[in-house]
Image: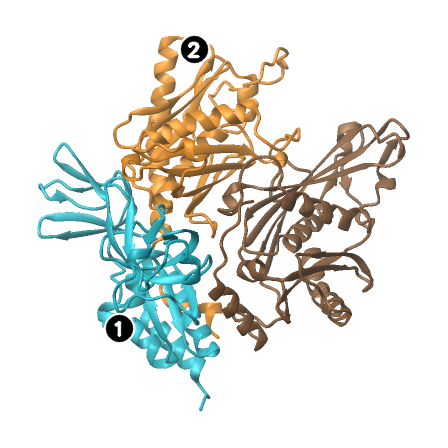
Chain colours: A cyan, B orange, C brown
Amino acid sequence: MSDFDATRHVVIPGELIDSRGSKPGEGTYAEDGHVYAAKLGIVDLREGLVSVIPLGGRYMPRADDEVIGQVVDLGPSHWLLDINAPYPAPLHATESPWRVDFGDTGRYMHIGDSAICRILQVDETKRVQCTMQDSELHKIEGGQIVEVSHSKVPRIIGKDGSMIQLIKSFTKVQGFVGQNGRIWIDGNPEDVMIATRVIKLIEEHAQAVGLTEAVNAFLKDAYAGRA
Amino acid sequence: MENIEHIPKEIQLVDDSGRRLDGRRLDELRPIRIEAGVLKRPDGSAYIEWGGNRVLAAVYGPREAHPRHLQDPARALVQCRYNMAPFSVSDRKRPGPDRRSVEISKVTSEAFSAVVFTEQFPRTSVDVYIEVLQADAGTRCAGITAASVALADAGIPMRDLIASCASGKIAGQVALDLNKEEDNFGDADCPMAVVARTGEIVLLQMDGHLTEDEFDRAMKLSMDAARRLNEMQRDALRRRYAATAMDETLGGDAP
Amino acid sequence: MSSEVVSELLREAIVKLAASGRRADGRAPDEVRPLKIEKNYVNTAEGSARVKLGNTDVLVGVKINTGVPYPDTPNSGVLTTSAELIPMASPTFESGPPSPTAIELARVVDRGIRETKTVDLDKLCIVPKEKVWVLFIDIHILDYDGNLFDASSYGTLAALSSAKLPGSKIGGEDRPLPVDHWPVSITAAKLRDTIVFDPGLDEERIADARLTVATDENGDIRAMQKGLRGSFSYDEVRKVIATARTLGNGIREIIRQ
């Protein structure tokens, strides 16, 4: 169990991060053979590719990401999902788990409903296509959705899922963490509330040293004196 | 800069030892403090105190650009709105944009458009808000300097931060960072904004009267100051994300 | 103000939680968020205060100058209140002329000051029929996380109570603006069948009804405003008043510091 490396250097847009010919990856740009940071974040260098992992910023959809979307509009043969990104994701009736007659989309999902879906592709103009056809993708019923900054998702999942496991072991909730920062939690209300507060705690203190221990202590405290 | 016809004879903007009314030398900036990430709702934010100026900056985006007909199919728009709170000046300012605010909003949007990687977000808008809470001359420079930090805080991809300050002429001498009295009674004011690393000028305005030589000296003062401002901007961002020990922060979160 | 789609899940989760006496941020139903007040926040205003109620952040400025009285009140000062929901405070706030929400907010805060004679306008006459003190209260919402009514009214009271009449502008001396009463508003939101106080953003978004009650230092009711499309029973109203009185006393102490 290793905590987030607190000593890693935060880089700022315009900062020089490599002059030895590494390739410019995400969050960087190249100029005259040098690579500079384009975003505020942490430098990641592997196999000659240098990128910047952003500390904040909005979620940008990528193919194969599993996300939680909310229906904000619908047409006769599609729903329009808000995926907490600068771009909406239309979901065509043919990509849903149901056999939908033309004009009948409202029978299966209406405005305000949420669903777990997967991004199929994002083209150069950033038009998004997604699907709900897969056993693990489904409309969400019951439970609660918590929204966090998408850049904190790795911290909430933890190394090899360790953080999410820690939360589940105490709260016994079931859930799903969307890559877009939306997290679905289901269980009894008390436990859901505690899980939610822990997630918000992690989001707020993602950079802190000793976060895992603090989360452990919080959960122990929350469940102390219970049968 | 206001047109003051009557300059009181008692006001000596620069004394014989080169000190200004507030004690500064000609090449000194007013005291400045920058904080990043000060508001909860926006995607990024920053606050700056610059002499008597208190300015908040916030960024939302990239987000869908509205109205639809303004969308650019190839890139993000960078839309900046500069506004002064009614109580930010001694004579209350009516709420709502006046012509000066609209002009400042425009040149500021253009300055940021020069550094933001807008092609990465077609059809969207990056909305930058600059709100002056307390004004003491140089508000657009303070606003741009803070908004740059807010853009970085919001994770917007950019070539670099932009730093902005103004130089001018008071009592016949070129001086850095004019305050309100100096702006009122001075001879020239020249706000500018530069891309930190390359020194490219992305905003430049001037009113008053300067010889070419005076202009060169004013720009040199501003460029030097911009470097110092840039250090403060970076420091504010690093402090925001400095790893802190969990003990201090757990505080009120325990159940 | 543009609206955001509220998820059914969110509504159900909050309502269920509230019904069992809990709230998403761990507060009790009658618990107010931490309140921080900084008076004299801007030196360009004759009075000002920045208020943080939880994460809701409001800056109120009071500008005072001399001016002409209204013809029908020739010996009274003039008071005008406006509110700006600036776009940076929420993705749902748009720039442009004041929305109905901004106008309602300004008018409710204004009534809370005017009708309670918190500031007695009859004391603000300089030269009868010719010159009076004119007060502009400007409420500037900086960060919106629920309950603008209370945050704005605390900010307004704090700003007025630390404001100076700029007597030096008319050859006299600066002196404190006289404040005669201390009405404190407390807002309650009804979430299906449960009532919670100082609603946070999510609670406000799903509330069926809202009731704001201002009580003064003697425990008397000085202002009320009900909002949204749901309803309250008479019993519920009495309970809200009683709680508003208790909570209001605690808030009043903080504002008076």
Q: Position of residue A197 (x, y in %)?
A: 44, 69
Q: Please give left or right for residue C3 compared with residue A103 in the image.
A: right
Q: Position of residue C68 (x, y in %)?
A: 82, 28
Residue B210, label in figure: 2
Chain of the residue on which disc 1 is drawn: A
Quarter of the image where one finds residue B8: top right
Query: What element does badge 2 sit on?
Result: loop
**As rendered, which of C93 and B206 lies closer to the eye?**
C93
Query: What element does badge 1 sit on?
Result: helix
Residue A162, label in figure: 1
Instruction: Name the amino acid, label 1.
Output: Ser
Q: Please give left or right for residue B183 compared with residue C150 in the image.
A: left
Instruction: Name the amino acid, label 2.
Output: Leu
Name the residue rendered at 45%, 47% in the picture. Answer: B42
Quadrant of image for the N terminus of chain B: top right
Residue A211 visible, this orientation: yes
Q: Please give left or right for residue C227 compared with residue B211 in the image.
A: right
Q: Which one is closest to the eye, mark 1 or mark 2?
A: 1
Quarter of the image where one finds residue B150: top left
User: Most extreme residue toward the front, as rendered?
Assistant: A101
Seen in the picture, residue A36 relative to A54 is either above or below; the reply is: above
Q: Please give left or right for residue B141 compared with residue A4 in the image.
A: right
Mark 1–mark 2 contact, CB under 8 Å?
no
Q: Position of residue B218 (x, y in %)?
A: 38, 19
Q: Are marks 1 and 2 on the same chain?
A: no
Crowding at mark 1 (Cα within 10 Å: few <14, some 14-19, many 20+):
some
